[in-house]
Image (cartoon, rainbow, N blue to C red):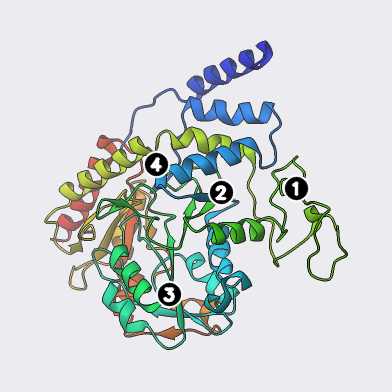
């Protein structure tokens, strides 16, 4: 039950939000058009302040509720919140190294197939676990890899596949999941950029053994910072929970005791019989939890996922129509059989365009249109990988093209039709001027 003083404070929060969010006119060339960002309404602000008033400063009731609700959205059995999507990737892959998996567990030197073009925290956990990344190329246009490339990369030490859906555009995940099944490989779906996307009518994030999500402000839902690991496999879920929570064996919620009814009635490892289960550690873990402040915001955001997805699809389609036929540019395409909830709108400058990516980007940035390169481009060209072990399967030709010639602009729900039309017109004007 909310107290009178809480009601008064939260009503003041709503008033404050409305004062801060008074609409201002879009001024072309003056108003900054971000490539990504959070869309926060007054319900979100109230949810965050409400949790603060209750001093829910650690993971608790809101975190557990978000986990249940988010798992339900994807139709999966278990979700575990983390402090970031990068941490979610680390937990997902580290879970596959654990002894509970028996002979299937990943061991140092085992190979994990991934793409060379993407965000590095899909790849870092492979190296951090003493495993070997096997880099494969992607397609221009969809910016995803293919099942054929994955199949060609499988070797005698291949044990897993870990790939992200590129900017919300699903890779052919059903085919790659079937390939993983045939070869006895684990599949981790990095779904951080693609929450709400569909492949063959099914949500991305539901094809792999484990999937991850991110709630950074740029993503489809935000908690400020935050991430999640989801799975249908209860054994993997239990491992993820332990690794996230210091590696402890106990699964009591905060403030609870003796959920297993044998807190002082068991013996593990070399510990004495009856050693407190709350302080028994079965994994070498981390502390990667989030807080209820974040989860309260996430719960409010979760109710808006359908409308956010609709806005992203509408905005992408508007740019696609506005830039159709512009010479010198390769426009993005949805992977066949997919319905992406787009993260961004990707453009690749053709080699014979008569202008460079740098020139077009400078033109857009001068008009206050924010741009981003396609994350790391070819990861193997970065200093971080200069002394790291990896294997390359085939050529990374397209990853190199992306590194040199590709960038993206925004489609997030905070952009209006007027803004999108200005973005498209700015690109057309630049290309036309170079006739």
**Residue at the disc numbered 4:** 32
Q: Nearer the viewer, mark 3 or mark 2?
A: 3
Q: CA distance from mark 1 to mark 4?
A: 57 Å
At x 39%, y 41%, the residue is 32
Instruction: Quickly name the residue at label 2.
Output: 226
Q: Nearer the viewer, mark 2 or mark 1?
A: 1
> Dot 2, how many residues are within 10 Å of its Cα: few (below 14), some (14-19), or many (20+)?
many
Residues under labels 3 and 2: Cα distance? 28 Å
Instruction: Find the distance from the CA under tag 3 to the CA under tag 4.
Output: 45 Å
Local secondary structure at mark 1? loop
Q: Earlier in the sequence, mark 4 or mark 2?
A: 4
N-terminal label among 3 and 1: 3
Nearer to us: label 4 or label 2: 2
Residue at image mark 1: 261
Q: Which mark is residue 155?
A: none
Instruction: Between residue 368 and residue 393, name the one nearer to us.
Output: 393
Q: Would residue 95 appear left or right of 279 to someone viewing this image?
A: left
């Amino acid at each position: 039950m909310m107290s009178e003083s809480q009601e008064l404070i939260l009503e003041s929060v709503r008033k404050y939000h409305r004062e801060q969010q008074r609409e201002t006119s879009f001024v072309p060339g003056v108003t900054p058009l971000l490539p990504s960002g959070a869309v926060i309404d007054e319900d979100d602000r109230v949810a965050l302040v409400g949790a603060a008033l209750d001093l829910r400063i650690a993971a608790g009731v809101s975190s557990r509720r978000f986990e249940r609700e988010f798992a339900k959205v994807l139709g999966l059995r278990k979700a575990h919140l983390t402090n970031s999507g990068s941490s979610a990737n680390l937990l997902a892959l580290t879970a596959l190294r654990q002894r509970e998996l028996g002979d299937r567990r990943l061991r140092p030197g085992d190979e994990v197939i991934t793409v060379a073009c993407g965000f590095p925290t899909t790849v870092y956990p492979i190296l951090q676990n003493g495993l070997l990344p096997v880099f494969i190329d992607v397609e221009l246009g969809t910016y995803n890899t293919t099942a054929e490339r994955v199949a060609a990369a499988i070797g005698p030490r291949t044990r897993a596949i870990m790939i992200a859906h590129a900017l919300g555009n699903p890779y052919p995940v059903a085919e790659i999941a079937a390939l993983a099944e045939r070869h006895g490989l684990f599949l981790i779906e990095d779904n951080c950029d693609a929450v709400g996307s569909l492949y063959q009518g099914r949500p991305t994030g539901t094809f792999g053994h484990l999937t991850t999500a991110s709630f950074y402000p740029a993503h489809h839902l935000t908690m400020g910072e935050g991430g999640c690991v989801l799975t249908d496999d209860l054994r993997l879920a239990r491992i993820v929970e332990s690794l996230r929570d210091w590696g402890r064996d106990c699964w009591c919620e905060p403030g609870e005791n003796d959920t297993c009814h044998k807190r002082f009635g068991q013996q593990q490892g070399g510990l004495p019989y009856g050693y407190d289960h709350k302080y028994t550690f079965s994994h070498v873990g981390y502390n990667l939890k989030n807080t209820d402040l974040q989860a309260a915001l996430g719960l409010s955001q979760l109710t808006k996922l359908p409308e956010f997805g609709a806005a992203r699809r509408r905005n992408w389609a508007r740019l696609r129509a506005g830039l159709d036929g512009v010479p010198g540019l390769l426009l993005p395409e949805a992977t066949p059989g997919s319905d992406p909830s787009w993260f961004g709108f990707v453009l690749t400058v053709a080699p014979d365009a008569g202008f460079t990516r740098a020139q077009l980007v400078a033109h857009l940035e001068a008009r206050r249109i924010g741009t981003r390169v396609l994350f790391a481009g070819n990861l193997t060209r970065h200093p971080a990988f200069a002394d790291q072990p990896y294997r390359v399967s085939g050529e990374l030709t397209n990853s190199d093209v992306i590194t040199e010639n590709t960038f993206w602009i925004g489609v997030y729900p905070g952009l209006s039709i007027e803004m999108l039309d200005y973005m498209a017109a700015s690109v057309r004007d630049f290309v036309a001027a170079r006739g």
